[in-house]
Amino acid sequence: MIAEALDKIRSTLPQGVELVAVSKFHPVEALAEAYAAGQRAFGESRVQELLTKIPELPADVRWHFIGHLQTNKVRALVGTRRIALIESVDSENLLRIIDSESERAGVVSNVLMQVHVAQEQTKFGFLPDDLLDFFRRRAFESLRATHICGIMGMASNTDDTARVRADFEAIAALRRRILDIAPDLRGFDIVSMGMSDDYPLAIEAGSTLVRVGTAIFGERE
Ligand SMILES: *Cc1c(COP(=O)(O)O)cnc(C)c1O
């Protein structure tokens, strides 16, 4: 079932769009099944859960952290030296702590800046103006062990496709505006947007990385 779901989703992804299988709350057996079907990138949203899963899966798994990251958990996460991408940097303070902990661990962390464009109050992330301001101030220049690889965002949780499309377009446009502000940014290429219910719309709007959970693994417990 997992293999079939993966095949189905992959067949719809254009070249250059990466699929991250969001495996949070699912047991390692489910991840192993996806791995056997060729899946290598997995997304988890809790540090403790990720720490227990890492040793249970092969070493070539690329782990993405996609949840709200508490500053007191950064050392444990970065210290695994196994995180391919932290997608959910939602404050400058968190970014600084990731940077210092990465330097301490002797790794370079790849991260995405999470932007908040959705209607809901509860979602984490930089407001677009604050993110533009961050790059205008060139605050990234002082990072020593962190590479900002792009942005991540979520659309509003609504059936209104026009609204969802507008949210995704706003996220993709924000990346282009950031590159206008800081044209010397290197490798600022990733636009992570799109989940089970909305990833086709996200791809139309320019997503390069979709984070799909339910459509692969079924409902979470
Ligand atoms: C849980 C989660 C997903 C996957 O959601 P599905 O609707 O199950 O595909 C994607 N992105 C983030 C940030 C998540 O927390």
Image (cartoon, helix red, strand yellow):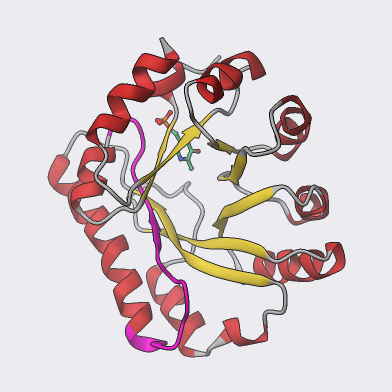
Residue occupying the far right of the picture: 104
Left or right: where 133 falls relative to 99: left
Is the stretch drawn in magenta largely helix, strand or loop?
loop
| Quarter containing the N terminus | top left
Q: Nearer the viewer, residue 37 or 5?
A: 37
Taking the spot 16% from the left edge, 39% from the top edge, the residue there is 160
Residues shaded magenta? 180-197
Q: What residue sits 36% from the left and 37% below the top?
A: 195
Side (left or right) of 132 relative to 107 = left
Residue at 61%, 87% (x, y): give it.
141
40 sits left or right of 107 in the view: left
Q: In the rendered view, would you say 106 is above or below 201? A: below
Residue 76's place in the image compared with 197, above or below, is below
Q: Position of residue 167 (x, y in %)?
A: 26, 54
| Residue 196 covered by magenta stretch | yes
The verdict on residue 209 being magenta is no
Query: In this rendering, is residue 146 above or below 119?
Result: below
Q: Quadrant of residue 212?
A: top left
Where residue 117 sits, quadrant-wise, is bottom left
Quadrant housing the C terminus: top right
The count of marks equals 0
